[in-house]
Image (cartoon, rainbow, N blue to C red):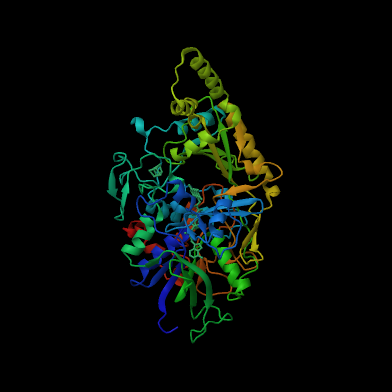
Amino acid sequence: MGDEERYAAVIIGTGFGGAITGCRLAKKWDKGAVLILERGKRYPMGSFPRAPHDFARNFWAIPEEKRRRPKHVQKLVDRGEECHGLFDIRNYHHMDVVIGAGLGGGSLIYANVFMIPPDEIFDERWPSSCRRPHLLPYYQIAKEVLASRPIPVNDDPRRQIIRQKLFADVAKRNGKNSELVDINVFFGNNFQSPIAIGQQDKNRYGAIQTSCVYCAECDIGCNYHSKNTLDLNYLYVAERRYQAIVLTEHLVTNVVPVDSQEHDDPEADGSNGYRVYYRKLMSQGSQTLSAFANRVIVSAGSLGSTELLLRCKEHFRTLPRISDKLGQSFSGNGDFISFLLGSKLPANPNYGPVITQRTDYNLFQRFDPNRAFILEDASYGSVLAWFVEGAKPGFLHLGAIGRLLRHWLTQLTTGKSPGSLGWALNDVLSDDLSYHTCVLLCMGLDKSNGVMTLDENDHLALDWPFRDSFSLYRAILESSRRFASTVEAEFFTPLPTWTWPIRNNVSAHALGGCVLADDPSKGVTNAARERFGEVFGYRNLFVADGAIVPTAVGANPTATISALSEGPRDNGNRPGCESLGLEKASCCMESRARGLV
Ligand SMILES: Cc1cc2nc3c(=O)[nH]c(=O)nc-3n(C[C@H](O)[C@H](O)[C@H](O)COP(=O)(O)OP(=O)(O)OC[C@H]3O[C@@H](n4cnc5c(N)ncnc54)[C@H](O)[C@@H]3O)c2cc1C
Ligand code: SF4
C-alpha cells in the first residue's frame, strides 16, 4: 500500500448526511484531509437529460449489480451498457424505492421540502438523546444553510400557482389545516424581495443560481440550478473553500479495519484506521483503488449504507462485529401517491416548484399514530404533461371521438378538413387533461418494520410487511377519495401497483437500516452524545444519513437527516465532536450556518 493516499476522513456518498458531514470535517482539518467519494455524476447547470434517448439512460444500473430493475433499464444492462444516471429505482417485495445518484444525492431529484416533524414522532423507538428539543438548533442551522423558505407571495401573475390555491381551498372545505411549506429553492438571496424570475445571481456561497422559473421539473433535475441542491451549498463550500477532495463516479465496495502495521485486519476494531476500497467507474476495465482513512463516514443513503455494511459484515466479513440489528427498521415514510383526472376545478400541476403546500391529517394536530399523515400538492413538468395527455384512460377520449365523427360529417358535407395534425393538436389541446389533473402525494407514519437482508447475489433485498401499515394507507385512501369528490373529479386512482393482489408501494423517502440506539441490542449506531452515529463494535466508523433514522418521521425527511448530521447538542457540547473531530457547538451555534460562507 506504499503510494496509497491517506486521509483524516473518507466520506462515502454525497446526499444530506455526506454533504453536511463532509463540509464540517473539511472545515475542521487541513486542505486535502477529507476525501468524499460519490458513485454518481456531477450535474453542472443545464446538464440534466431531457431528450427521450438521454432520459432512457438516466438511471443507475451497472452490470455487476444483479438486481431487479425496470425492464427497459435491464435491457440496457443486458446489452452491456453501464448507466451512471440520476435515478436508482429498486423493485423489492411490496415496496419499490426511488433514490438519487449524483453529486448531491437525493437533493438533485427531491421536491425541495424542508419540514420539521412534530414532537410526537420521537417516540420510545428513538434514543433519549434524539428528541425534538435536542435537535431543534440543528434543524435551524440546516434550514439556514439550505436557505429554506415558502414560495414568494405577491401580486405578480407569474407567481400565482393555481394548484396550491386549489389544495388550500379543498382543505378549507374539508375542515383541514393547510399551509405553505418551506422549500429549498432560490428566488434571490433576500427572502423579502425576490429577484425577477429567470434572473441569475450568486448565492451566499458563491455558486451561480437562477431565480426559479416555475417549470415544475424539480424531480428530474433543475436545469436552471434554482433548487438549493447540496452541490451548490454544503458540497460547494467543502470543495471550493475547504478543499476537500471530491471524486464522482467512484463506487465504494468494501471497508476494512487495519492493524497497527496498517495491514487489513477484519479482527481489528478500527482504532488504527480503515482501508476503503472503491472502483473508478470511468476507467477502462475494472480498476479497484484504495485509500487509508483514520475515520470513515458511511453516507450512502438508507439503502446504500445498509447494503454496503451488510456486505462488509456477511459477504466480505471485514466488519463482522456490526450489530445483528443491521437492516432492520426500514421505513418508506408512509409514502402513498394517487392521481385524479378531470377535476371540475383547474389544478395546473405543470407550473411552479414541485411541492408548495401541505395539508395536515393527524400529524401536526390531533396526533393519531395510526392515521398520521400529510397531503402535498405534487406537480410534474410539462414534458411529462404531454405523456399524460397520451396516456389518459379510453373513456376520457369520448369527447375526442365525438369531435372526430362531427369532423367526418363536416368533411362529407362541405369537403373541408383542418388536416390531421390540426386535428391531433386540437384533440389534445381542447381536452387539456393535465390542467385538470391532481397528484396527491401523501406521507405519514408507517410501522417502520421493513427488513433489509442480502439476497443470493449478495445484493440488498427488502421485505415490506405492508399489511401492518394498513390503517395508515386506508386513512390516506379515504381522504384522497374525499379530495377527488370535493373537486368533482371524473377519475381517481392510487398508483396502479397498489391494486389488489399486487399491493406494491413506492417510496421516495427510504429510512432506517442502521438505526441509532442506546445499545447494540436495539440498533446499529451509537446515540450516546460523545460517540454520536458511531457503529457499535467499531471506533471511528460512522453512519450519517437516512439509515440512522429509527422510524418514519411523517414529514419529508431531509430536515431530520440534516439535523442529525449537523449533530444534536447537549449543554453546549456537540455530541461526536471529539470522535468526528468537529468543533464545539457552543462556540459556533450562532455562526455555524453563516460559517459556511
Ligand atoms: C423524487 C424524490 C423527491 C423527494 N422529495 C423530497 C422532499 O421534498 N423533501 C425531503 O425532505 N425529502 C425528499 N426526498 C427524499 C430525500 O431525497 C432523501 O430522503 C434524502 O436524499 C436522503 O439523504 P441521505 O443522506 O440519506 O442519502 P442520499 O441523498 O440518498 O445520498 C446517498 C448518496 O450516496 C451515493 N452512494 C450510494 N452508494 C454508494 C457507494 N457504494 N459509493 C459511493 N457513493 C454511493 C448515492 O449515489 C447518493 O448520492 C425525495 C426523494 C425523491 C426520490
Ligand atoms: S420549478 Fe423546480 S425545476 Fe423549475 S426552475 Fe424552479 S426549482 Fe428549478
Residue furthest top in the image = 413
Who is closer to the viewer here, 419 or 226?
419
Residue furthest bottom in the image = 261
Measuring from the top left, give residue 376's x and y in whole percent. 52, 39
User: In the rendered view, would you say 518 is above or below 112?
Assistant: below
Measuring from the top left, give residue 101's x and y in whole percent. 47, 57
Horizontal side of 151 relative to 299 (left or right) equals left
User: In the rendered view, would you say 283 is above or below 443?
Assistant: below
For the point 57% across and 68% down, the residue is 309
Who is closer to the viewer here, 151 or 534?
151
Who is closer to the viewer here, 80 or 444?
80
Residue 74 in sight from this viewpoint: yes
User: In the rendered view, would you say 474 is above or below 253?
Assistant: above
Measuring from the top left, give residue 12's x and y in whole percent. 47, 66
Residue 567 in sight from this viewpoint: no
Horizontal side of 469 relative to 202 (left or right) equals right
For the point 63% across and 37% down, the residue is 477
Horizontal side of 508 relative to 429 (left or right) equals right
**Image quadrant where one finds the C terminus:** bottom left
Q: Quadrant of ligand 2?
A: top left
Image quadrant in which you'd find residue 217: top left
Image quadrant in which you'd find residue 5: bottom left
Measuring from the top left, give residue 499's x and y in whole percent. 67, 41
Horizontal side of 190 relative to 493 (left or right) equals left
